[in-house]
Amino acid sequence: MNHLAHLFLSQSDLNLMVGNYIADHVKGKKINTFSPEIQQGILMHRGIDQFTDEHPIVQKSKERLYPKYRKYAAVLVDMFYDHVLAKNWANYSPIPLETFTQSVYRALLAKEPLFPKSAKLMFEHMTRFDWLFHYSTIEGMQKALNGLSRRATFVSRMEEANSDLQHDFILYEKEFEEFFPQLIEYANTWTKAYD
C-alpha cells in the first residue's frame, strides 16, 4: 500500500502513524533508534506490505500490469489502490478526505524532528503539494507517477501508467473493494495488540 492507505490504517495512534510513515526510510538496526511505540508502527507498515504483496487479489492487479511494467507493477498497484481509496473515501471514513489529510500533516509535523533525513524531505514535498488529497484526481496521480518515474533506478515507464489506471479503473476498483476490508481487519490486529 502507499502513503494514504498506511496513514488511514494507523490513524488510531500518532506513534503508529509516524512509524508507518517513516518505515520505508528505516533500514536494518536503525529501527532500534526509535521509541518502542514508533518501532511498532514501522513493524505494522512492514506487516501491511507483506500482507498486501502476498494477497491473491493484489496479485491479480499486479499481473495485469506486469507485462508492461515488470518489477514496477507492485509500486503501481500501491499507487492505484491509494487512488481508489481517495476517490471512494466516503465509503471508508466519515471524515472528509481534505480534513483527514490536513489533520495528518499537522500531526506528523509535530513529530518531524524524529524523521530520518529522506523522510523529512519527502514530507516537505508531500505537504507542499498535498499528495494525499491529490491522489483522488487523475492530474494528481499523473504528477505522482511522473515523480516515481524520475526517481526510478531503471527505465520504468511509470509516467505512462495513468492510461492503464483509467482504462481498467473498474477492475482495480473492484479488486480494491474486495481486498481493503481484509486489510483493515489485518491492520486492526496490530492496533489491538498495541492497545
Image (cartoon, grey):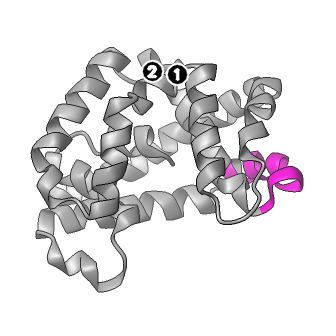
For disc 2, the marked residue is 89
Q: What element carries label 1?
A: loop
Which residue is painted at 68% across and 36% down in the image? 175
Which residue is painted at 48% across and 24% down in the image? 134
Range of magenta residues: 58-70
For disc 1, the marked residue is 136
Q: Answer yes or no: is residue 189 visible.
A: no
Which residue is painted at 89% across and 54% down in the image? 67
Measuring from the top left, give residue 179's x and y in whole percent: 58, 41
Of mark 1 and mark 2, the one earlier in the sequence is 2
In this view, the residue in front, 158 or 8, is 158
Q: What element carries label 2?
A: helix
Q: Does the magenta stretch include residue 4?
A: no
Measuring from the top left, give residue 129's x and y in whole percent: 40, 29
Q: Estimate the spatial distance between the alpha carbons at disc 1 and disc 2, rounded to whole Å.
A: 9 Å
Measuring from the top left, give residue 1's x and y in whole percent: 51, 48
